[in-house]
Amino acid sequence: MTDLEAALRGAVRGEVGCDVTSRALTTMDASNYRRVPLGVVAPRDADDVAAVLEVCRERGVPVVARGGGTSIAGQATGTGVVLDFTRHMNRLLSLDPDARTAVVQPGLVLDRLQEAAAPHGLRFGPDPSTHGRCTLGGMIGNNACGSHSVAWGTTADSVRELSVLTARGRSLRPGRDWAGAPPGLRELVDGDLARLRTGFPDLPRRISGYALDALLPERGADVARSFCGSEGTLGVLTEAVVGLVEAPRARALAVLGYADEAGAAQAAAGLLPLGPLTVEGMAVDLVPSPSAAGLPRGGAWLFVETGGGTAAQARARAQAVVRAADVVDALVVTDPARQRALWRIREDASGTATRMPDGTEAWPGWEDCSVPPARLGAYLRDFRSLLAAHGLRGTPYGHFGDGCIHVRVDFDLLTDPGVARFRRFSEELADLVVAHGGSLSGEHGDGQARAELLPRMYGEETVALFERAKAVWDPDDLLNPGTLVRPAPLDANLRFAVLPREPVDVEFGYPADGGDFSAAVRRCVGVAKCRTTSVSGPAVMCPSFRATGDEEHSTRGRARLLHEMLAGELVTDGWRSTEVRDALDLCLSCKGCRSDCPVGVDMATYKAEFLHHHYAGRRRPAAHYAMGWLPVWLRWAARTRTAPVVNALARVGPLAAVAKRLGGIAAERQVPRLAGETFSRWWRGRGGPGGEGELVVLWPDTFTEHLSPSVGRAAVRVLEAAGLRVVLPPTLRGRAVGDGASRSAAALLAARRGRVCCGLTYVSTGQLDRARAVLRRTLDLMAPVLETAAPVVVLEPSCAAALRTDLPELLHDDPRAARLAARVLTFAEALERHAPGWTPPAVDRPVTGQTHCHQHAVLGDAADRRLRESAGLTGELSGGCCGLAGDFGFADGHYEVSAACAEERLLPAVREAPDGAVVLADGFSCRTQLEQLAGVRGRHLAEVLAEGLEAGDGRGAG
């Protein structure tokens, strides 16, 4: 233990982390920069903060305050001690509806404040797109804004009073009329009043530099306001009194379509006199399918939100906006769910913009310059010209009503020439912004990305005044040094510099990243959507973070550790890293990040890749053999017809306990019962396929085959009722489609018997060599199917997802893999596409349950929704993950997290369901979790429809 660590542990009650994992998790924020800290402290209160400052001051160690770590400019990284306020100092201390104020701690996530204020008809005005994970302390540090700033201003407009500790331990309460000013600050201001009155551009979004002009006497000498946007360089915030605003009772959203972004930008300022709540802009580049997203015609759009006391008032104001706008097309949306869906498109732009339409990476650095709103159109034209002159591309979007533009540019930050061009472009763009009367930062702060260029905006003398102000507050330069004043160069500390330049030898193909695992890991840019503590609608990501609250168990945290593994500086043992292994251990492989992460991080695949290398040539955990090889053990039980014996032994407590211990299975779990008759044996007993309709191949996945054959039987019943001819895949290589099995002696001698398998259990445990062998055997067996046009219907969502994604990505060198993946359909998709005239039976009951996480992430559930609606199955399924997730919830040490995931959404949805509701659960894991944790039987949609057919209401005919 180092002297620093020992001193911190002796001084604070909160957690101290100087280990590899703690440090690796905080090397980066959402910027291009990386700095390795000495340690991380999660203070429990202001006394802990004071103790950390004292320990670090004595040793000359810098201190960096950190909230959600979503800063774009690098100001949440540092080389000293990082203060993580999200773990303990994250509470809403009080809320006064009459005074319209709240007292908050710096680690409080904005959405938690909004939820507490909403019952009183109030809200906090500023709302960055990261509102589900950004903290009030970070918002104050950056003077954050968000989409509603045209109505309610920046965070500084909502701050009333602060509690601040200076680096030398002084406790201050900054407010108006010089309240809480450190000694010497008033004298500094009084000595340079003329510069403060004339040296700052008058902009709605001027975030760059220190807001020293807020200290002018005519502006109330507001020390709290001047502290906002100081990026943790003046003092450490421990508490804040913030103002709340009245929330409109009703809202409407006018979506205005324009030919291009310049047209939208020019129009934005003209709409401000109508009093909108937002005027947001984005171009078609960020929406690959505008029609699918429900956007009106156009090449760019303004999202203009209006409010009112009633829905009619809000709608009338939105319609007035449409009439006042010269648009290509427009629509007015009043449905709250539809508004949220449209806003998600805009909010996800910070992640979506990290990829050009052709997949090229794009990076922040010039995320949020702002100009006077009336000059925005002209600025954007000049900005586009500058991009073209440097051979760069970017897609502007953002707060058009405030003249603030977000854009990620396809900088090459991996090579020396590319970094040099990044610098040249940055310098020229700074001059362009200043020429238009703008600010280098309009929302996210300067950080390392722009602070070096502040003299171009303010001049050397004003920047020297900033340095003097910093010295008044922090004479030892202890707090976030290298940020804002005396900054590090904008092209130093780039996080990509430490990554390997040569491609890493990997198993998966990573087609979206050119086969480069480093590029796949670089996808995580830190926007931290995975750190939200609650999800709504169908969202899944990231259940393990919501269960634990630990960054280590978020998608971003795991990506950071993989980044450091590739860098080799902190994590030095590569694929053998125990730190990475432990972080990935609680990844459920739910694949939620594949769809919900705005940059498409696929941690389930990264986990499988890591486990493959980590255990190469070494003994694996027992669960990898017990559950990773589940298809083998179940086939063995079926062939020897010992399922009844296995079931009986599993019910003998002492024997079951020993078996679970040997197999690495959680003691709390019950071993699922094996079916007495497999699905395939039932199929052979019924005489094979029937009917003369269109051919479909029903996939006998391991779970349907051995554990839930009733699902397979039901699916056959429904598919045949829909007029389809159902067959099973060949079990002998080279046999015709529909064989299912062969009794020919000649065939038995000439061909090898086998069973198709998606390889899911091998992939999820990282046994990729075995998975590849199983999948190649499967492709051999499926060769006759691929010669037909028959679809492959897969009942188990996780198996369907494995065939759709893991198969072609793992066997990227076999063209048959992509062909089979393209044939895979879910049960509902097969009925919709291949029996479009069929009408399902009228079940006419409410439903509850959860959309399978793999279905949500990979397959989509639109066809399922339509099928349910057609059958009279009403209601919505919840999102999230059941928590069992294949082998995850069975593995020893995972039970508590598994149960916590189920308790988040699935189990409450079932408990709150109306009487007579059908509990739908298409996945075997989901059904098992429901049975073991709630004593509830979940059913596959095929089973529900088959029961409806048996009821014989007459609607099952084509």
Image (cartoon, rainbow, N blue to C red):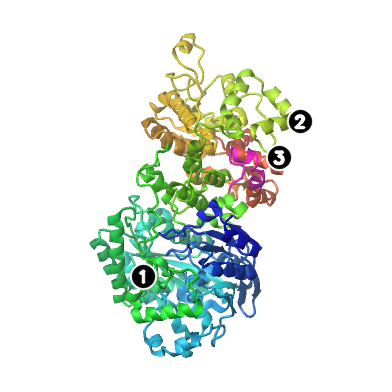
Q: Position of residue 725 (x, y in %)?
A: 49, 27
What residue is at 35 percent from the left and 82 percent from the top?
A: 461
| Callout 2 secondary element | helix
| Foreground: disc 3 or disc 1 | 1
Q: Earlier in the sequence, mark 3 or mark 1?
A: 1
Horizontal side of 862 relative to 116 (left or right) equals: left
623 is higher (above) or lower (below) than 168: above
794 is higher (above) or lower (below) than 907: above
**Which residues make up the magenta segment?**
881-899
> How many numbered markers are drawn?
3
Which residue position is annotated with label 1? 452
- Which of the 4 quarters of the picture holds residue 275? bottom left
Q: Residues within 10 Å of mark 1 (few under 14, many from 20)?
A: many
Q: Position of residue 140 (x, y in %)?
A: 52, 72
Q: Position of residue 376 (x, y in %)?
A: 33, 72
Cβ atoms at labels 3 and 1 below 8 Å apart? no
Q: Position of residue 341 (x, y in %)?
A: 49, 58
Type of residue at label 1?
Answer: Glu
Which residue position is annotated with label 2? 654
710 is higher (above) or lower (below) than 93: above
Which residue position is annotated with label 3? 668
Horizontal side of 330 relative to 648 (left or right) equals: left
Separation (CA) of disc 2 from disc 1: 69 Å
Q: Nearer the viewer, residue 591 or 708?
A: 591
Based on the picture, tell me whether residue 896 belongs to the magenta stretch.
yes
Q: Earlier in the sequence, mark 2 or mark 3?
A: 2
Residue 491 in view (yes/no): yes
Cβ atoms at labels 2 and 3 below 8 Å apart? no
Type of residue at label 3?
Answer: Glu
Separation (CA) of disc 3 from disc 1: 58 Å
Q: Where the N terminus falls, by quadrant? A: bottom right
802 is higher (above) or lower (below) than 493: above
